[in-house]
Image (cartoon, grey):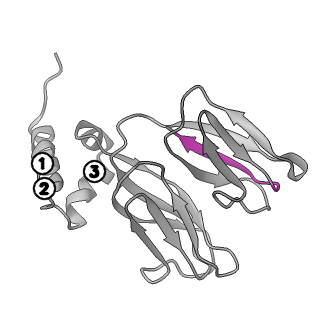
């Protein structure tokens, strides 16, 4: 039997507080970002989805049925600013605008390991990439193409299929 440390018991208490709406400040979640084992012990995971605004238009990146507990910009990919006025996170989505393109660090209620998959639309054709699970959520990790990869326009997921088109080539994670 694995010994449970005081940190994990404390994490359980913090989770109970978070569920009661008492742990809304970001400092409660910093420990989950810094300690993935602690996060997993209380049912949280840190994921790193990429969300991109092109031509300064808003873009919404959905994370399936996950609930975002805390998020911040891990790495800016654009010349445009990615500050609190150019992105927001609420519920299960990240919204970016004004040219903000970034990799986000998101603490969420994911209690399984997501799987990674590369899926490529060659010659701008529609392509389905079948996964060994029924997809409840998916997100873009890294775009490999010059073509855009906008969710629900250039890529999406349903049942056990992640699809791409319009030249989108990328690495995705799904659960």
**Residue 97, horizontal then vertical, whole percent:** 56, 78
Horizontally, residue 167 falls left or right of residue 103, namely: right
Q: Earlier in the sequence, mark 3 or mark 2?
A: 2
Alpha-carbon span between mark 3 and mark 2: 18 Å
The magenta stretch spans which residues?
166-174
Dot 1, crowdedness within 10 Å: few (<14), some or many (≥20)?
A: some
Dot 2, crowdedness within 10 Å: few (<14), some or many (≥20)?
A: few
Alpha-carbon span between mark 3 and mark 1: 15 Å
The residue under label 1 is 16
Mark 2 or 1: in front is 2
Q: Quadrant of the N terminus?
A: top left
> Of residues 80 and 110, which is closer to you in this image?
110
The residue under label 2 is 20
Q: Earlier in the sequence, mark 3 or mark 1?
A: 1
Q: Are marks 2 and 1 in contact (CB under 8 Å)?
A: yes
| Disc ID at residue 133 | none
Q: Secondary structure at mark 3?
A: helix
**Residue 143, horizontal then vertical, whole percent:** 69, 55
Please name the residue shown 35% across and 51% down the image: 108
Q: Secondary structure at mark 1?
A: helix
The residue under label 3 is 32
In this rendering, is residue 90 above or below 154? below
């Amino acid at each position: 039997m694995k010994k449970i440390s005081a940190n994990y018991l404390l994490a359980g208490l913090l989770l109970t507080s978070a569920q009661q709406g008492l742990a809304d400040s970001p400092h409660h979640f910093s420990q989950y970002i810094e300690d993935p084992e602690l996060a997993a012990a209380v049912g949280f995971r840190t994921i790193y989805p990429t969300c991109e605004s092109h031509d300064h238009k808003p873009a919404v990146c959905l994370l399936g049925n996950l609930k975002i507990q805390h998020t911040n910009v891990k790495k800016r990919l654009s010349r445009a600013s990615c500050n609190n006025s150019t992105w927001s996170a609420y519920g299960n989505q990240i919204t970016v605008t004004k040219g903000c393109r970034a990799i986000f660090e998101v603490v969420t209620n994911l209690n399984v390991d997501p799987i990674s998959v590369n899926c490529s639309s060659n010659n701008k054709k529609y392509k389905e990439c079948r996964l060994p699970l029924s997809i409840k959520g998916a997100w873009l990790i890294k775009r490999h193409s010059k073509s855009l990869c906008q969710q629900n326009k250039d890529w999406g997921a349903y049942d056990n299929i992640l699809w791409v088109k319009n030249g989108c080539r990328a690495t995705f994670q799904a659960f």
